[in-house]
Amino acid sequence: MTDTIEQYDLTDDATRRKIFWLLQRVSSLSLWTRKREAFARFANAYEHAVNTWPDDDPDGIQDSHFPIIAEILAAYDRGLTELARGNRLIWQCGGPLQHASRRYAFLDAYFYPHPDYWDRGAQAAPYPPKIEALARLLHASEYQMEHAPFDPGNRFGDLAKLRSARLLLSPNAYERNFHTLPYPVFPEDLPEVPQAVGPVIKTGQKVPCDGIWEPVAVEWPKWLGIVPIGKRSLRNDGCFNYFIRGIRAPNLRDGVTGLFIRTRWRLLWEDRRYTDGVVPDESRYFLEPRQVPQTSPSP
């Protein structure tokens, strides 16, 4: 897949549908439940490996991760209980799922700090095979841009988490130094992006409700191309983001100058999932890659 500006144009209907669907996916109870299940499988495998690791194995194993693993699992459990009730404050700073993600990042960075494979808080070389098998299980709980619903912070000047559609749509964004995250499989009939009818807020203002928001620019029709007249219109001015209620609407960043840009955000979709205690069918978020039919060679 080729990265082009046109391919990720947020005025393109297909691109808008994909970003909208991916933000619903990454903020879903099903995805975070799968994250917890995958991390639990790693935890079980890690415990078994520590208990059965040969004493004479030259590679050794870091056997001190049990407390942080238990801490992450407990944070997942607290967060998932709240998310199942429709409480999305679990993604605010200090919330349980934000905490689980932050502690996971620490565990991943210091999972195997052997000087032959690790340098300054990061993996620097391919792990030995048995360590790599555990690392694969660890990374199976990762999803690209899983932090998209997180609170960007409460200080004025914070940046939107999702500043480019490439972070969700480019296959290159799924590449890590020593592993690759699975690229999502889109359903054939992606839902339409709703027509925006919600409020418009500015950078620094409090977000009134959970949901998907679109940065917009204000345009006025002008008489003789100079004097503004008539009613204003709003056009897309960047990538959709997922916000939780109560946070301060963040800035965007100019892709050329790197400067912060104050912007307006328009509500596209209010997230009311799970507030009634019902979890809808979310299996479409986890489709298997389509199998390419194999052709038999001619006799």
Image (cartoon, helix red, strand yellow):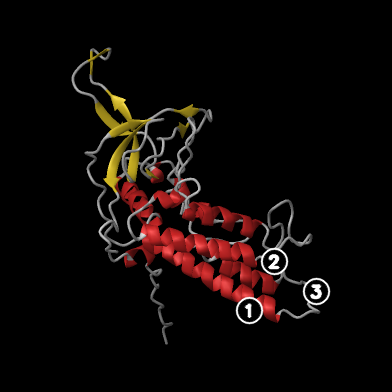
Vertical order, 33 against 237 (above or below): below
- Which residue is label 1 attached to? 48
Label 3: state its secondary structure. loop
Provide residue 49's location: percent of width, then percent of height: 66, 77
Disc 1 vs disc 3: which is toward the camera?
1
Give the residue type at disc 1: His
Amino acid type, residue under disc 2 in the picture: Ser
Q: Nearer the viewer, residue 127 or 199?
A: 199
Q: Which residue is mark 3?
A: 58
**Residue 36, position as x, y percentages in the image:** 48, 66
Q: Which residue is mark 2?
A: 64
Which secondary structure lies at badge 1?
Answer: helix
Horizontal relation, residue 282 to residue 43: left or right:
left
Residue located at (37% from left, 67% from top): 287
Quarter location, residue 26: bottom left
**Is label 2 in a helix, a strand or a loop?**
loop
Give 166 or 83, whichever is nearer the viewer.
83
- Asked whether the viewer can see residue 184, the reply is no
Q: Earlier in the sequence, mark 3 or mark 2?
A: 3
* Picture layout, residue 6 above or below residue 237: below
The spot of residue 12 in percent (x, y) is 32, 43
- In terms of image quadrants, where is residue 231? top left
10 Å crowding of disc 2: few (<14), some (14-19), many (20+): few
Cα–Cα span, label 3 and label 2: 18 Å
Q: Earlier in the sequence, mark 1 or mark 3?
A: 1
